[in-house]
Every structure is written in structure tokens, then in C-alpha cells.
């Protein structure tokens, strides 16, 4: 079996961790969050190298981009209204909003780069071995 490119392997590992967290959160809160659970079909498609994986991957990135844009727009409006109230606190630690924005943009850019990379397209177009199906 042809191995995925290094960047795609890293992204698949990241998606696997996010899928476990999303499933754990869905079970604990008894609420389905399609924004985080949407990573599961993408991960399955990438691992199995299905024909639809590239399309689902790009659609999921579109959803992430829209979500990030909505959160960013909301944060900008909230900051204009009341700057002292725009805080992100995780386990008692105040996390700077610019740091969160930079990390989100880097992760989103990395995913978009991989979705449009020729190596990803080549990996997904390569025929999967017959014994694996």
C-alpha cells in the first residue's frame, strides 16, 4: 500500500485525535455537534482512499472556513462593543485572542494547502489494493 505524504499523515493523525475527542464529547454531553463530528467521514475517506474523499475533505474545509469567519466576525463586533469582555478562559488560564486567531489561521491554511496539493490528489487517485476492500 502506498503511504500518504508526510503532511497528510500528520493531518490524518490530527483528525483521528479530534474524532476521538468529538465522540467523547458527544457521549458525555448527549449532544451531536456536526462541526466537530464532521471530521469522521473525512478521516474514513482519507484512510480508505475512497473516490469521494477529496470532495468531502474540501467541503469540510469550506465548513471550517465559514465557521472560522463567523466566529471571527462575532469576536470583532464583540470587541468593538466591549473589549474587556472578549476573553477566552480555559481551566482558569486567560488565553490571548490573537494567539487563538493565529493558531486557527495556521491550521486552516495547512489543511487548505494539503487539500489542494498535488501529492494529496495523487495519493487519493491511486487505486487501493483489492484485498483491502
Image: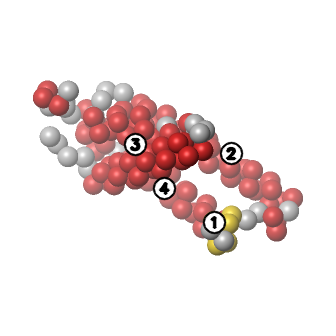
* Quadrant location of the N terminus in the rendered image: top left
Return the disc, 2 or 4, that comes first in the chain's sequence. 2
Place residue 119 in its image quadrant. Answer: top left
Return the disc, 2 or 1, that comes first in the chain's sequence. 2
Looking at the rendered image, the disc whose residue lies closer to the viewer, 1 or 4, is 1
- Relative to 27, is 7 above or below? below
Residue depicted at x 27% and y 34%: 48
Q: Nearer the viewer, residue 40 or 126?
A: 40
According to the picture, the residue beneath numbered tag 3 turns out to be 115
Marks 1 and 4 sit apart, C-alpha to C-alpha, by 20 Å
Return the disc, 3 or 4, that comes first in the chain's sequence. 4
In the rendering, which numbered label is found on residue 36? none
Q: Secondary structure under badge 4?
A: helix
Looking at the rendered image, the disc whose residue lies closer to the viewer, 2 or 1, is 1
Marks 2 and 1 sit apart, C-alpha to C-alpha, by 21 Å
Residue depicted at x 60% and y 44%: 29
Residue depicted at x 56% and y 46%: 28
Image coords of residue 63 (percent x, y): 56, 38
According to the picture, the residue beneath numbered tag 1 turns out to be 90
Marks 3 and 4 sit apart, C-alpha to C-alpha, by 12 Å
According to the picture, the residue beneath numbered tag 4 turns out to be 107
For the image shown, how many numbered marks are present on the structure?
4
Return the disc, 1 or 4, that comes first in the chain's sequence. 1
In the rendering, which numbered label is found on residue 70? 2
Marks 2 and 4 sit apart, C-alpha to C-alpha, by 17 Å
- Answer yes or no: do the residues labelled 2 and 4 have beta carbons within 8 Å? no
- Relative to 89, is 24 above or below? above
Return the disc, 3 or 2, that comes first in the chain's sequence. 2
Looking at the rendered image, the disc whose residue lies closer to the viewer, 1 or 3, is 1
Q: Secondary structure under badge 1?
A: strand
- Relative to 12, is 33 above or below? above
Amino acid at each position: 500500500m502506498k503511504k500518504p505524504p508526510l503532511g497528510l499523515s500528520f493531518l490524518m493523525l490530527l483528525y483521528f485525535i479530534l474524532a476521538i475527542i468529538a465522540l467523547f464529547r458527544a457521549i458525555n454531553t448527549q449532544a451531536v455537534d456536526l462541526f466537530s463530528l464532521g471530521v469522521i467521514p473525512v478521516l474514513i475517506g482519507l484512510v480508505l482512499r475512497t473516490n469521494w474523499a477529496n470532495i468531502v475533505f474540501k467541503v469540510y474545509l469550506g465548513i471550517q472556513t465559514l465557521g472560522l469567519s463567523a466566529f471571527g466576525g462575532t469576536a470583532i463586533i464583540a470587541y468593538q462593543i466591549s473589549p474587556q469582555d472578549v476573553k477566552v478562559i480555559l481551566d482558569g488560564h486567560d488565553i490571548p485572542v490573537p494567539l487563538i486567531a493565529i493558531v486557527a489561521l495556521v491550521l486552516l491554511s495547512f489543511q487548505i494547502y494539503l487539500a489542494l496539493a498535488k501529492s494529496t490528489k495523487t495519493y487519493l487517485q491511486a487505486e487501493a489494493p483489492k484485498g483491502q476492500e
